[in-house]
Image: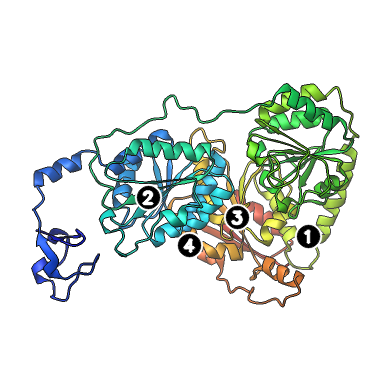
């Protein structure tokens, strides 16, 4: 029997409760609006045949999940819980068909970071599933990471039943408000929603706007029957590539002609255009520095490569940029962290017109796809410019910088310094690896000291959120497993600090559960060393930055994975190579002295 509250419509279904309605104490009240038992009336018994038919027909969640699958969502990260059971069951059916994979994480924030990393690498969204209330709000940090780093992501946030909204029910939060600034688009499922169109719109907007989107799923609506069909992306065009006019490129070339010592700054927007960037730079003999986001796009061994520019950069890049008379920004945003020298003439090319001059005054900008624009521009300017040759200078600067790195690596007798650890990593990490880095001193060290080959780097670049390293590696591993992936079968290495790993340490159980071949290198100095440095630089006392850590290696072994702790600087390189080269997950703890 069902008893219905005459005030708010809440249903007490005896078949789903441990106590019959008649046996409830007189003090019992409606859990939604708080009125007593006397305000309830008996409702109709559900029709068994109708229930059977409803179960056989598709419901709204099933149409939603099928549509997302049709459009290309292959991975869902998240936690199954009481306010997303209908959607979770629909995803389960996609998993059973082999069309989706579900990664059950231990904290929703880690799920969002994993999904953000997947989007950064793949250029298409995965989904992340949560319950209502705290499950959804735990997502926010990772969703903001996706927003600021322009990564597509679909947040599937469960919600309390629609009929209970507005009554301050358990875990009730107006989920549109906290997510409004973090996502580009929001959708709320209702019984009359065109759910297929809703899901396809969410997917398209995530890709076209390079942003996270949110679908709010009230618990009682998720399993409502639907006569709709899932949609497909047939005939859909996801993007158009702008090209500048010949007149605009002529004006750009006139500025190039006036320079003698230009330098190219490559940003994340060049991820699919490095062949064209190299052809342009080699034809005109222009040095190339990268932002941190583009580290690894160009091997540091290339004759024109200068390494990363800015706070996390090399002396080579910063010196050449300082001496230049023209900055050519390609797919970069000129963020504060990159510290592009002021009072320099700047030209910029970006596929997004809104990026031109957004963070920095520029002298001229071209809105265009870099891979298509550079060859046309090169044909215009190559007969009109004559820059001073810089390769010999670049080589000499690298020799000086490498000598300095050796000094820093061996600065503390009998100890492993960050520079020494990065020197060993340079020789140990596979040249095609995806390297997920956490924020803090470990990120600065890797930017400066690690010499990249063709690795792809992940970081919380604009949000700068501690703890991102391990969850991002999980998302990267998933991206590497997918067919037709731009990073298919590439090895995954996380390089994290002890402060960052402490944020999501239990996600190592996720690595173990799904047999993820991830190597996690932990710089353990028992300190939030970057914060200590900031305190000293600001003339504060160093306070509350020390850490009490477990043995990370022993923890990893308890999770059922390989692990090793490295303390000997004399054998560090060979020990690290051995640990990284083995099959399966391995946590590598390195004792670091700053």
Instruction: Mark 3 or mark 2: name the one nearer the start of the chain.
Output: 2
Nearer the observer, disc 3 or disc 4?
3
Residue labelled with disc 3? 463
Is residue 97 visible in the rendered image? The answer is no
Q: Mark 1 and mark 4: span between their CA atoms?
A: 32 Å
Q: Mark 3 and mark 2: span between their CA atoms?
A: 24 Å
Quadrant showing the C terminus: bottom right
Neighbor class of circle 2 (other Cα within 10 Å; few <14, some 14-19, many 20+) is: many
The residue drawn where x is 66% and y is 77% is: 543
> In the structure shown, which secondary structural element does the residue marked by tag 1 occupy?
helix
The residue drawn where x is 13% and y is 66% is: 39
Q: Residue furthest front?
A: 7
Q: Are marks 3 and 4 in contact (CB under 8 Å)?
A: no
The residue drawn where x is 84% and y is 56% is: 404
Q: Mark 3 and mark 4: span between their CA atoms?
A: 22 Å
Who is closer to the viewer here, 236 or 188? 188
Nearer the observer, disc 1 or disc 4?
4
Residue labelled with disc 4? 506
Nearer the observer, disc 2 or disc 1?
2
Q: Are marks 3 and 2 in contact (CB under 8 Å)?
A: no
> In the structure shown, which secondary structural element does the residue marked by tag 4 occupy?
helix
Neighbor class of circle 1 (other Cα within 10 Å; few <14, some 14-19, many 20+) is: many
Neighbor class of circle 4 (other Cα within 10 Å; few <14, some 14-19, many 20+) is: some
Q: Are marks 3 and 1 in contact (CB under 8 Å)?
A: no
């Amino acid at each position: 029997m069902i008893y219905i509250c005459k005030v708010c419509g809440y249903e007490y279904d005896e078949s789903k409760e441990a106590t019959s309605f008649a046996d409830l104490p007189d003090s019992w009240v409606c859990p939604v609006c708080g009125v007593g038992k006397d305000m309830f009336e008996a409702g109709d018994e559900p029709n068994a045949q109708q229930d059977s038919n409803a179960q056989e027909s598709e419901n709204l969640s099933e149409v939603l999940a099928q549509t997302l699958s049709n459009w290309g969502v292959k991975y869902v990260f998240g936690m199954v819980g009481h306010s997303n059971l209908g959607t979770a069951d629909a995803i389960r059916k996609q998993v059973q068909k082999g069309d989706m994979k579900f990664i059950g994480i231990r904290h929703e924030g880690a799920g969002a970071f994993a999904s953000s990393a997947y989007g950064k690498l793949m250029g298409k969204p995965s989904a992340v599933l949560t319950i209502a209330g705290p499950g959804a709000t735990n997502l926010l940090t990772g969703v903001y990471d996706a927003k600021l780093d322009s990564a597509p992501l679909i947040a599937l946030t469960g919600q309390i039943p629609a009929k209970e909204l507005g009554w301050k029910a358990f875990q009730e939060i107006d989920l549109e408000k906290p997510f409004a600034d973090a996502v580009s688009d929001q959708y709320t499922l209702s019984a009359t929603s065109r759910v297929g169109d809703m899901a396809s719109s969410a997917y398209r907007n995530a890709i076209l706007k390079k942003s996270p989107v949110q679908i709010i799923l009230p618990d009682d609506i998720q399993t409502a029957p639907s006569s709709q069909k899932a949609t497909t992306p047939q005939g859909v065009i996801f993007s158009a590539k702008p090209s500048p006019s010949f007149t605009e490129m002529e004006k750009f070339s006139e500025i190039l002609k006036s320079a003698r010592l230009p330098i190219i700054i490559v940003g994340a927007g060049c991820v699919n255009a490095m062949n064209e960037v190299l052809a342009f730079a080699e034809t005109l003999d222009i040095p190339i520095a990268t932002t941190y986001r583009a580290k690894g796009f160009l091997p540091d061994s290339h004759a024109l490569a200068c390494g990363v520019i800015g706070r996390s950069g090399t002396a080579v890049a910063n010196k050449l940029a300082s001496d230049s008379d023209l900055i050519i920004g390609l797919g970069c945003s000129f963020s504060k962290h990159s510290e592009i020298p002021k009072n320099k003439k700047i030209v910029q090319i970006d596929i997004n017109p809104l990026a031109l001059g957004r963070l920095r005054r520029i002298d001229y900008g071209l809105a265009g796809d870099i891979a298509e624009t550079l060859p046309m521009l090169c044909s215009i300017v190559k007969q009109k410019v004559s820059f001073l040759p810089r390769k010999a200078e670049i080589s000499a600067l690298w020799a000086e910088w490498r000598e300095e790195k050796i000094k820093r690596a061996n600065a503390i007798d009998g100890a492993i310094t960050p520079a020494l650890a990065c020197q060993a990593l340079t020789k140990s990490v596979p040249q095609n690896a995806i390297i997920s880095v956490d924020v803090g001193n470990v990120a600065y060290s890797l930017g400066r000291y690690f010499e990249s080959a063709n690795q792809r780097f992940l970081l919380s670049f604009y949000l700068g959120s501690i703890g991102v390293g391990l969850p991002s590696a999980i998302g990267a591993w998933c991206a590497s497993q997918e067919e037709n992936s731009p990073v298919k079968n590439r090895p995954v290495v996380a390089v994290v600090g002890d402060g960052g790993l402490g944020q999501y340490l239990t996600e190592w159980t996720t690595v173990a559960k799904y047999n993820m071949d991830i190597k996690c290198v932990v710089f353990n100095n028992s300190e939030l060393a970057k914060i200590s440095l900031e305190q000293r630089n600001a003339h504060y006392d160093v306070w509350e930055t020390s850490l009490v850590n477990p043995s990370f290696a022993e923890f990893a072994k308890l999770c059922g994975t390989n692990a090793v702790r490295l303390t000997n600087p004399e054998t560090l390189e060979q020990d690290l190579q051995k640990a990284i080269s083995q099959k399966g997950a391995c946590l590598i703890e390195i004792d670091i002295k700053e």
